[in-house]
Image: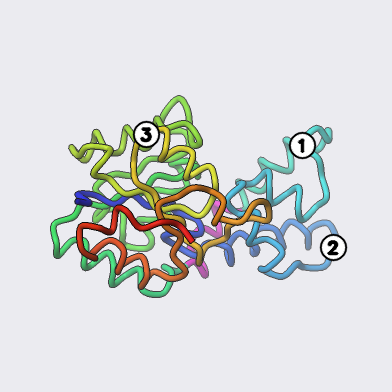
Amino acid sequence: MVEAVLFDLDGTLADTAPDMTRTVNEMRTRRGLPPVAPHVVRPHVSRGARGMLMATFDMATDHPDFPAMREEFLAVYADNLCVDTTLFPGMAALLDRLEAENIAWGVVTNKFERFARPLLQQMGLASRAGVIIGGDTCPRAKPFPDPLLAAAERLGVKPAETLYVGDDERDVWAARAAEMPVVVAGYGYLGDLSPPSEWKADAVVDSVEELDAWIFRAPERGRRSAR
């Protein structure tokens, strides 16, 4: 039985790619470069500033300008946290249903807490989430299990009764290491590496409605295989 649900933030709970794209394009404009479309940025959001800069500026992490570019990205993004960011379709209803069923929910993300918490506050979710764990909250971030285990402990639930939902393979690694059931948000960003069907999650869902059905289906839901 699922007693709590933990969500990754970018690409799982909320569609943050529009504001990530806004940030990238502001930086490109400063350099006289043309804007990029959201679909260029989207697959790299889960990899953070480093992944997005590598993809949109063709800049390796060992480039001498990379540290300054990363700091610029974080500063610009701080001013664009919640301009066009929205919950994924169906997510508001799912959160309402979890609360109505007395199932605790929270957020475990690799986004630094100084960005994650204000973003959730602007979305009206920070006070509703039972726990918010950022990428710098614990000594080790995902793919290590530490953030998931810390979240379960704060919620007072057993890891085995806590579902984690994410859109990156390292989310599955972290959940498996924490001995938590895990569902892949197939509607999320996913990246451009291996397909989620190969990640060995408990399920892959293509919409929030499918996630809702998976959580609230009969007890045998825990035995559903990933597609």
Instruction: Please name the residue shown 67% across and 51% down the image.
Output: 193
Q: Which x, y percent locates residue 29?
A: 78, 63
- The residue beneath circle 3 is 178
Nearer the camera: disc 3 or disc 1 = 3
Q: Within the magenta stretch, is there residue 132?
A: no
Cα separation, mark 3 vs mark 1, equals: 30 Å
Q: Which x, y percent locates residue 34?
A: 82, 67
Instruction: Please name the residue shown 58% across and 63% down the image.
Output: 17
The residue segment tinted magenta is 77-85
- The residue beneath circle 2 is 33
Instruction: Please name the residue shown 44% across and 54% down the image.
Output: 9
Q: Which x, y percent locates residue 103?
A: 18, 55
Image position of 134 (left or right of 158)? right
Secondary structure of the residue carrying tag 2 is loop
Secondary structure of the residue carrying tag 1 is loop
Mark 3 is surrounded, within 10 Å at the Cα level, by few (under 14), some (14 to 19) or many (20 or more) other residues, namely many
Amino acid marked by disc 3 = Ala
State the mark number for residue 61: 1
Q: Nearer the viewer, residue 81 or 169?
A: 169
Farthest right residue in view: 32
Amino acid marked by disc 2 = Leu
Cα separation, mark 3 vs mark 2, equals: 43 Å
Instruction: Please name the residue shown 41% across and 29% down the image.
Output: 138
Nearer the camera: disc 3 or disc 2 = 3
Q: Quadrant of residue 12?
A: bottom left
First in residue order: circle 3 vs circle 2: 2
Mark 2 is surrounded, within 10 Å at the Cα level, by few (under 14), some (14 to 19) or many (20 or more) other residues, namely few
Secondary structure of the residue carrying tag 3 is loop
Amino acid marked by disc 1 = Thr
Marks 3 and 2: CB-CB under 8 Å?
Answer: no
